[in-house]
Amino acid sequence: MLIEHCSLEHISKLSLVFDEYRVHFEQESNLEASTNFLKERIGNNQAVVFAAIDEDSTDIMGFTLLYPMYSSLKLKSTWTLNDMYITDKYRKFGVATRLLETVKAFGAETDAQWVNLKTGTENVKAQALYEKFGFKKDEGCFYYYLHQ
């Protein structure tokens, strides 16, 4: 398994898996919109995407998508791990672990104050994996959303 920092060269294969991810979370499939979204994020340096690639088939096994953020109080950059998805075929092969190792190293390499993420309260497997990597559950803050 190779972990690659994705560029526009990866878009054709990456957008297929990204669209699959969206469908997995009950969004309608829209490959064109998925492709355009990734082109904009990667092309404008608005996101960092790491993909796990099967060395034999060159299939994308899974990906993680990070967005840059900033801490005004700490005067440092941070990363939001917004999306992570492993295709059904490659689950239980350690793909998520390898991607999280890459994210952790990338956070350190970029001197980020932290990497944050959110996951569903029902997703106990993911919670266990995140905690294994040192992520801490925030018990002191509420998160609010204003839908537009």
Image: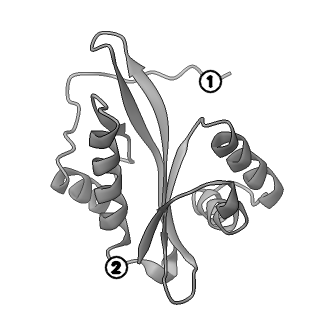
- Which of the two marks, 2 or 1, is nearer to us in this view? 2
For the point 69% across and 67% down, the residue is: 16
Q: Is residue 72 left or right of residue 57?
A: left
Instruction: Give above or below for 125 relative to 143.
Output: below
In the rendered image, is residue 113 in sight? Answer: yes
Query: Mark 2 = which residue?
Result: 92
Label 2: how many residues lie within 10 Å, few (<14), some (14-19) or many (20+)? few
Label 1: how many residues lie within 10 Å, few (<14), some (14-19) or many (20+)? few
- Helix, strand or loop at mark 1: loop
The percent coordinates of residue 112 (x first, y second) are 31, 31
Q: Is residue 136 left or right of residue 61?
A: left
The percent coordinates of residue 102 (x first, y second) are 34, 56
Instruction: Give above or below for 144 relative to 35.
Output: above
In the rendered image, is residue 123 in sight? Answer: no
- Helix, strand or loop at mark 2: loop
Q: Is residue 105 left or right of residue 11?
A: left
Upstream in sequence: badge 2 or badge 1 = 2
Alpha carbons under labels 2 and 1: distance apart = 35 Å
The percent coordinates of residue 142 (x first, y second) are 33, 22
Check the image and name the residue furthest to the bottom.
56
Q: Quadrant of the C terminus?
A: top right
For the point 38% across and 41% down, the residue is: 118
For the point 50% across and 77% down, the residue is: 88
Q: Amino acid at mark 2?
A: Lys
Residue toward you, 49 or 131: 49
Residue toward you, 120 or 102: 102
Check the image and name the residue furthest to the top.
73
The percent coordinates of residue 67 (x first, y second) are 50, 37
Query: Mark 1 = which residue?
Result: 147
Q: Amino acid at mark 1?
A: His
Q: Quadrant of the N terminus?
A: bottom left
